[in-house]
Amino acid sequence: MIRVLLADDHTIVRKGLKQILSEGIRSIEFGEASNASEAIDLLKKDPFDIVILDLSMPGRSGLDLLKDIKVLKPKIPVFILSMYPEDQYALRVIKAGAMGYMTKDSAPEELVKGVTKILNGGKYVSPALSEHLLDLVQEPSNTESHQMLSDREFEVLRLIASGKTVSEIGTKLSLSVKTVSTYRTRILEKLHLSTNSELTRYAMQRKLVD
């Protein structure tokens, strides 16, 4: 029996994933988590063969949860299923230990293919992402400035661009206002920007925010 943990805050998404995977893979059962703490609790109690993780959940981000999973259960493969375009997050999560990345608008058969490949010990990225990664290797000068940000800086960038205040970001990420302000300063310097409005424009033009 293959045990899959589905970590996504939308019940309808989890239901759809269960239906797709049940039709494509034999002898499969599921655990379900709607936030990071539920996912960690389930991983501590029950054995799983793979975690399918959404990046956008309440509380701790999916990227933070990925890192927690790799510490708690380093041998469990994690497959990221996200609404965000591959070129914005895939390389970042793969560096953090994910075994694959897929957008939620992918075909159902691709999901089954990706999960099966990972369960067999491989990694999954789409052909388009493979080509993008090859371009980055061959022409590193094409790398956009935000891809050089640390994971925490990237998260703060997205939250600022989403309209969150420094204090709201601090509360969400369990950071002091001073620390968030320091991250903001670093981000502006690295992106060669001056104001939050310029930062927001930068993020929206590159579809880094919803």
Image (cartoon, rainbow, N blue to C red):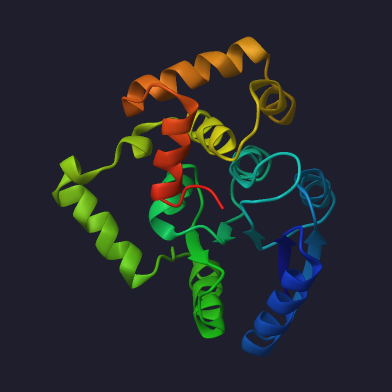
Identify which residue, 207 or 45, lies in the foreground: 207
Residue 21, horizontal then vertical, whole percent: 66, 80
Along the horizontal axis of the image, is 23 left or right of 134?
Answer: right
Q: Nearer the viewer, residue 195 or 23?
A: 195
Name above or below for residue 128 compared with residue 54.
below
Q: Quadrant of the N terminus?
A: bottom right
- Extreme top residue here? 178
Direction from residue 202 to residue 75 in the image, left or right: right
- Position in image of residue 63 (x %, y %): 58, 43
Q: Residue shown at 51%/66% (left/top)?
A: 103
Query: How far from the left and from the top, in percent, is residue 105?
Result: 53, 74
The image shows a total of numbered marks equal to 0
> Would residue 201 appear left or right of 139 to someone viewing this image?
right
Q: Is residue 126 above or below residue 147?
A: below
| Location of residue 145 by image quarter | top left
In which image quadrant can residue 46 be found? bottom right
Residue 122 percent across, percent down from the top left: 44, 65
Quarter of the figure with residue 144: top left
The residue that appears at 48% across and 60% down in the rendered structure is 100
Q: Residue furthest bottom?
A: 23
The correct choice, above or below, for 120 with respect to 50 in the image is below
Q: In the depicted view, which residue is nearer to us: 78 or 119? A: 78
